[in-house]
Amino acid sequence: MDKTRINLANSQELLEIPGIDQTRRDVIMLHRSQSGPINDAAELAAILGRESVTTDLLAHVDFAPADSTAPEAPGA
């Protein structure tokens, strides 16, 4: 199964992750633009809320590379 690189995914790619709706996508994109890449599942849970980060969602997400992010990030 292919995983989505959450730090590099565009708006549409984020919506293809099970459990990511438009509201959660917007939260992820805002976080990336203000704070940079999401490092791990714990940080994603802090951003979205623990109940939003399911095993199924995590099975579809790749946090690498954690040292870069999509174009909306600061300094990009």
Image (tube, rainbow, N blue to C red):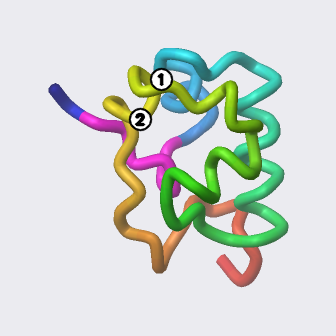
The residue shown at (35%, 49%) is: 62
Reply above or below: 70 against 44: below
Image spot of residue 8 (x, y percent): 48, 54
| Residue wearing tag 1 | 17
In front: label 1 or label 2: 2
Image spot of residue 56 (x, y percent): 40, 21
Please tell me how crowded label 1 is: few (under 14), some (14-19), or many (20+) other residues with Cα within 10 Å: some
* 19 horizontally vs 45: left or right: left
Which residues lie in the magenta part? 3-9
- For badge 1, the amino acid type reads Ile
Please tell me how crowded label 2 is: few (under 14), some (14-19), or many (20+) other residues with Cα within 10 Å: some
Return the residue found at the far front: 51
The N terminus, quarter of image: top left
The residue shown at (51%, 25%) is: 54
Residue 2 covered by magenta stretch: no
Specify the label residue 58 is tagged with: 2
